[in-house]
Amino acid sequence: MKISEDVAVAATGDTSLQSRIRGDQLLAVRRTVLMSIPVNVMLGIASVLVAWHAGLGAEGLAWFAASSSVNLLRAVLARMPLPSELDGRGWSVDQHLLAHWVMALSGGSVWALIAILCDGYTSPQTLFYIAIQCGITAGSVTHGFAYSPIPISFITPPLLGAIGGLLYAGGFDRNCLAATILLYLFALIRSSRDSETAFIENSRLKNQATAMSRSLEIANDQATGVAEEMRHRASHDALTGLLNRSGFLDEARGCTHDNAQGFCLMLLDLDGFKSINDAFGHRAGDNLLIEVAARLRQDLSARFLVARLGGDEFAMLFPIAVADEAEALAARLIGIIAGPFSALDKGRVGISIGLCAQPRVDIDEMLVCADAALYAAKSGGRNRYHVFDDGLRARLDMRRDVERDLGKALADDALEVWYQPILGDGGRSLNSFEALVRWKHPKLGWIPPQEIVAVASLAGLSEPLIRFILKEVCGMMRALQAMGLPHVRLAMNVSPREMLQVDIDELVLAKLSKDELPPAMLEIEITEETAMNVQAVQGKLGALSAAGVQITIDDFGVGYSSLGALRQLHVNRVKIDRGFVTGISGSAENQALVQAVLNLAQSFKFEVVAEGIESAEDLRKLQDLGCPLMQGYFLSRPMAAHDAIEWIGLTQPAAVTARTAGFAGRPLIEEARLTLQ
């Protein structure tokens, strides 16, 4: 039977220190009883042999039978099962100790009867039996160190019996021997008690150390559990239970593959999630994310890493055997997400997916590539996927080069601002210019303006870019003043991100004030997307409009800006998107749309510009419709500042008037060019 180290707990379920000590005492008693019985038996046999030799064989055998019976009972008691804390059966620790005490007293009483074998300590064998009793009592005290009542109960009857017998027999020698045995008894009792005290102290220290060790073990287990919980929380999304961005990146960097051609990273972005939040509240949005996460995990093996990177963006990384496997999975996931959701109409939610496959995992590179593919997928509409290909690779490489070099180019004034005329009077007279940023990269050549603006926003260079464009525009404004054309306005574009990231009103008005230029010569051109976010831009545009700066809406007609928004933003001019202008001569629908915008302009008192005129037929049709202002490559391409000055002199001679008598237009043009320098 396996005996628990903590017998007190096993016996009573009591975890107090006293109970533990009592339990240790019981264990020690059980061990020492089993150790002392063989010695007891051997001494008993020796006593029987001596009695047999003295002619008292029958008495000796009777005594030995009684002693053996007690020894057998003590051995059985020492091997009895300990009480179980599970079922509550069996004796308690104290009951076991009491039983051992009773059996020890019985054993001692049997040894006291040894006086029968030596005629009351008067026969020649007296010294032998006294020596036997002293030996067995000394051994009892030695073995019974844990619990003194047991050895004391064992040694007292035989030694007191010997003392009584010797005193009864009388004689000086016997009386002295009786006194010696009495002193011996006291010494054994004291030794037994001292041993018990020492045992109890050692047991107390051991149990306290054990309790402290267990407390430390429990504390360590708890600390380990808390640390594990913290690690889980740090690496998993609390809402969906998926890996979060940090956990996903850590897991992805440790990925290896066996028998696979490589890995595929999918970036998944929900279509229509913002409208769910706006229409049904954030709780509905959270429930949607939870259900989307569950759908993404279904039927996927453990080799898939699935994560929520943030917002409504998810990621999946998995090994692939063939390239088509990833595309098939993307198509299946689109179908899974397109299914109906709780409390939402079917088709209300979709998903766009960008895929990037590589022979090995470079998660940072794959995230960039998959993000580019995701952007391409979303540009194509809802529920589409796009695989990162050579075309996207070239565009990504270009963006990286642009992002790396744009800051230095701005610092070195390597960018340029070109100007495209906006003509009035049916396309015949100069009305204004649109300023367009240009950059001829030393490696990539001319960079599209929208790419420059996008990279500047991502690189934190929006404000330096706007300051550069504004500086160039102010220089052109001074040149126009020098030519006697203060009525010609200059329009500079401000993207939605720039509008949100930069205090455009403070920056523009401070520059105009410093250069002593009239705000009426400047026009801020924003997209219809910006105009839809009235609350975010109203204050800035209101300050500009109040100072005299003109406000223009670009790409009008492709968004959903309301007439109320146009009035709130103090819009002076709208530019009809080129998609409705290019080819208008052959499109009755576009003609009707432009006519409707022109009618609105008359009612709401704002100007209309048709941009994107690329043919004579389109020009004539717009003239027939009565469009007052026009812009397009057919009329004039964007030009560098000096070329724009020359263009004015060549195509708009009537607009250039001498400021003083005797000056022709040419000297004014030269002065304007010097102003630009």
Image (cartoon, rainbow, N blue to C red):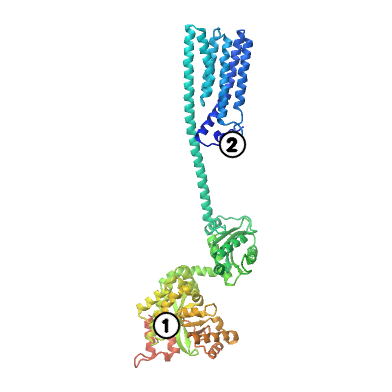
Q: Residues within 10 Å of mark 2 (few under 14, many from 20)?
A: some
* For residue 184, side relative to residue 84 (left or right): left
Residue drawn at x 48%, y 24% is 193
Q: Nearer the viewer, residue 449 or 350?
A: 350
Question: Which image quadrant: the N terminus?
Answer: top right
* For residue 537, side relative to residue 668 (left or right): right
Tell me the tag on residue 85.
2
Amino acid type for the residue under numbered disc 2: Glu
Of mark 2 and mark 1, the one earlier in the sequence is: 2
Residue 644 x/y as whole percent:
44, 84
Count of marks placed on residues: 2
Q: Nearer the viewer, residue 506 or 284?
A: 284
Name which quarter of the figure residue 517 lies in: bottom left
Residue 283 x/y as whole percent:
55, 63
Question: Which image quadrant: the C terminus?
Answer: bottom left
User: What SS does tag 2 mark?
Assistant: loop
Measured in 3D between alpha carbons, the distance from the residue under mark 2 to the one under mark 1, in whole angstroms, is: 100 Å
Q: Which residue is mark 1?
A: 642
Amino acid type for the residue under numbered disc 1: His
